[in-house]
C-alpha cells in the first residue's frame, strides 16, 4: 500500500497543529509510520486519502457500534441540522436520551449531558467531592479518565503510549489529592483508605480499556464496593468506553456491583461529541441549579449530538440480537488471533467482552498496569504495520482496546485472521 498523500497531509498538518494531530495517540508514534489521513468511512471500512480501504477495528475509538455512515443516525442528524445547530436552551431530545439511560441503569435516576468523556468524569468527580464534602480521590494505575488535571496521574491510553502517564503543567497541589491504587488489588485500595480519611470517591474503569483491554475481577469490584461503603466514599464507574459496548448495560450488565455514579461518552453520542454522568437523585440534585455544585456547558445537550445519540440508542434497543452478534464476532476474532499466534510461536494474551477486545504480546495473563507494561511493544508495532499493509486498521498502541461494529461480518473477520497468520509468521 502507498501512503504518499497521507505523508504529505501529515507534513502540512505538523506545520500548524502540534504533532500534526488533535489527540496524541493518533500520531502513530509508538508503532512508527505516518498516521493515515482519512477521507471517509463506510460500514466496517475506513478509506484513507490515498484511496486505501481498511477494515476498521477502531471505530473512532468506540462510538460507532453500527459502523460508519449508519443510515439511521445519518438521517436523524441531517433532520436535526435543518432545525438549527445549537440553541443554548433545553430541547425535548435531551430528556428523551436521559430517559433511555435512566431506564436501563437501575442506579441512575438523573443524567446530565456534557460534550466529552473528559468533561463527564471531571464533573462527576467534582460532584462526588461536593456531595461527600471530602477532597481526595482514588484512581487506578493504567486507567484513563480523560485529561483533566486531577486524573492525569499514572493514566493509560495516549499518556502511557508516550511514556508520560503524568503530565507537566499539572500542579502537585492538585495531584496530591489523587491517591493511586493497583488494578485488581483490593489491598492497595485499603492502603489508600488507611492513609487518608478524606476520600470522596474511588473511580475505576470496571472494564479497563486504556492500558490495553483488562477486565476487573468480579470479586475485586464487590470488595471495592464494600470498602467504599465502609468509608463513606462514592464508587464511580467510568463507562465512557464500556457503556453500551460491553453489553446493553455496559459493565453493569456483566458484573453485579452497583456504583454510585456512572460516566458515559462514545456510544451514547453515536459519533458526535457527547458525554454524560448520572446517579441517584440525592447525589445528582446537588448539581447547579438545584444544588451548590457548579457545572455547565454552552454546547451541552446539543440538539444535533442528541439526535445522533438517540438514533444510536434507539437502534440498540430495537435489536435484541445486537449484542449477541457483536460478542460472537469479537470471540471469533480473539480465538482466531490466539490460535494463529500459537501456530507461529508468538506469545499472545487475548480477551473480549461484548464488542470490546484486546490482545497483549505478553507471555503471562495481564491483570494490571504493571503486567500490561511487560508487553512487547516492538512486536505490537510490527503487527500493527503488517496488518495495515493487509488492509486491517487496529488501534495504534499496545495500550488501547479494539472494537467490533455491527457492519462487520464473519468473512471480514476470517480474512483478518488469514492476514494475521501471515503477519505473525513474518514476525516470528
Ligand atoms: N474515560 C474513559 C474510560 C475513556 O476511555 C476516555 C476516552 N478514551 C475518556 C474517559 C475521555 O473521553 P474523551 O476522550 O471523550 O474526553
Image (cartoon, rainbow, N blue to C red):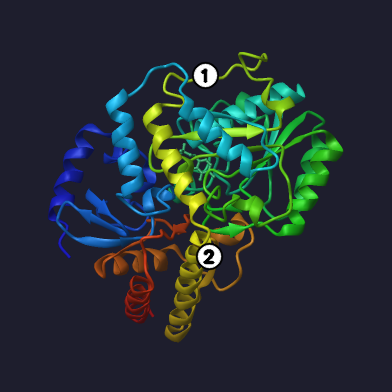
Q: Earlier in the sequence, mark 1 or mark 2?
A: 1
> Residue 409 occupies which quadrant of the picture?
bottom left
Labels 1 and 2 touching (C-beta < 8 A): no
Left or right relative to 372: residue 339:
left
Q: Residue furthest front?
A: 318
Q: Is residue 320 above or below residue 171?
A: below
Q: Residue at x 41, y 65 (%)?
A: 380
Q: Quadrant of the C terminus?
A: bottom left
Q: Residue at x 48, y 63 (%)?
A: 326
Tag of residue 324: 2
As helix, strand or loop, the secondary structure at mark 1 comes to: loop
Q: Position of residue 263 (x, y in %)?
A: 58, 38
Of residues 11 and 337, the one nearer the viewer is: 337
Q: Is residue 396 above or below residue 99?
A: below
Cβ of mark 1 under 8 Å from ligand 1: the answer is no
Of residues 168 and 267, the one nearer the viewer is: 267
As helix, strand or loop, the secondary structure at mark 2 comes to: helix
> Residue 255 occupies which quadrant of the picture?
bottom right
- Residue 269 visible to an observer of this rendering: no
Which residue is identified by label 1?
A: 296
Q: Position of residue 57 (x, y in %)?
A: 38, 60
- Residue 227 visible to an observer of this rendering: yes
Q: Is residue 58 above or below residue 136?
A: below
Q: Residue at x 21, y 38 (%)?
A: 13
Q: Residue at x 39, y 54 (%)?
A: 66
How many C-alpha atoms fall within 10 Å of the one at disc 1: few (<14), some, or many (≥20)?
some
Left or right relative to 4: residue 268:
right
Q: Is residue 328 above or below residue 109?
A: below
Amino acid at each position: 500500500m502507498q501512503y504518499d498523500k497521507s505523508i504529505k497531509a501529515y507534513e502540512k498538518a505538523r506545520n500548524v497543529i502540534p504533532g500534526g494531530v488533535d489527540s496524541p495517540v493518533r500520531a502513530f508514534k509508538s508503532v512508527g509510520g505516518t498516521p493515515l489521513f482519512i477521507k471517509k468511512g463506510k460500514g466496517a471500512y475506513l478509506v484513507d486519502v490515498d484511496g486505501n480501504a481498511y477494515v476498521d477495528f477502531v471505530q473512532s475509538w468506540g462510538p460507532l457500534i453500527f459502523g460508519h455512515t449508519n443510515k439511521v443516525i445519518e438521517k436523524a442528524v441531517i433532520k436535526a441540522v435543518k432545525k438549527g445547530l445549537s440553541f443554548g436552551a433545553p430541547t425535548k431530545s435531551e430528556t428523551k436520551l436521559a430517559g433511555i439511560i435512566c431506564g436501563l441503569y437501575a442506579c441512575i435516576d438523573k443524567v446530565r449531558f456534557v460534550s466529552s468523556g473528559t468533561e463527564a468524569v471531571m464533573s462527576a468527580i467534582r460532584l462526588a467531592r461536593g456531595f461527600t464534602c471530602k477532597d481526595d480521590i482514588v484512581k487506578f494505575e493504567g486507567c484513563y479518565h480523560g485529561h483533566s488535571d486531577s486524573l492525569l496521574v499514572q493514566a493509560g491510553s495516549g499518556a502511557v503510549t508516550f511514556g508520560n502517564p503524568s503530565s507537566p503543567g499539572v500542579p502537585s497541589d492538585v495531584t496530591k489529592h489523587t491517591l493511586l491504587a493497583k488494578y485488581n488489588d483490593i489491598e492497595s485500595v485499603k492502603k489508600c483508605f488507611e492513609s487518608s480519611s478524606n476520600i470522596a470517591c474511588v473511580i475505576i474503569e470496571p472494564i479497563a480499556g486504556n492500558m490495553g483491554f483488562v477486565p476487573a475481577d468480579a470479586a475485586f469490584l464487590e470488595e471495592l464496593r464494600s470498602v467504599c461503603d465502609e468509608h463513606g466514599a462514592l464508587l464511580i464507574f467510568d463507562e465512557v468506553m464500556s457503556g453500551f459496548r460491553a453489553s446493553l448495560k455496559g459493565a453493569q450488565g456483566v458484573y453485579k456491583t452497583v456504583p454510585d455514579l456512572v460516566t458515559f461518552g462514545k456510544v451514547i453520542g453515536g459519533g458526535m461529541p457527547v458525554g454524560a454522568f448520572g446517579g441517584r437523585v440525592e447525589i445528582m440534585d446537588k448539581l447547579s441549579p438545584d444544588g451548590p455544585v457548579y457545572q455547565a456547558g454552552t454546547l451541552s445537550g446539543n440538539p444535533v449530538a442528541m439526535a445522533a445519540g438517540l438514533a444510536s440508542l434507539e437502534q440498540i434497543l430495537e435489536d435484541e440480537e445486537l449484542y449477541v452478534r457483536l460478542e460472537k464476532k469479537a470471540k471469533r476474532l480473539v480465538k482466531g488471533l490466539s490460535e494463529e499466534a500459537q501456530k507461529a510461536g508468538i506469545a499472545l494474551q487475548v480477551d473480549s467482552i461484548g464488542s470490546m477486545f484486546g490482545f497483549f504480546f505478553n507471555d503471562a495473563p495481564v491483570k494490571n498496569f504493571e503486567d500490561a507494561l511487560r508487553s512487547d511493544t516492538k512486536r505490537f508495532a510490527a503487527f500493527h504495520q503488517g496488518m495495515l499493509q493487509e488492509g486491517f486498521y487496529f488501534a495504534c498502541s499496545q495500550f488501547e482496546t479494539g472494537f467490533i461494529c455491527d457492519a462487520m461480518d464473519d468473512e471480514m473477520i476470517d480474512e483478518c485472521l488469514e492476514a494475521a497468520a501471515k503477519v505473525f509468521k513474518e514476525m516470528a
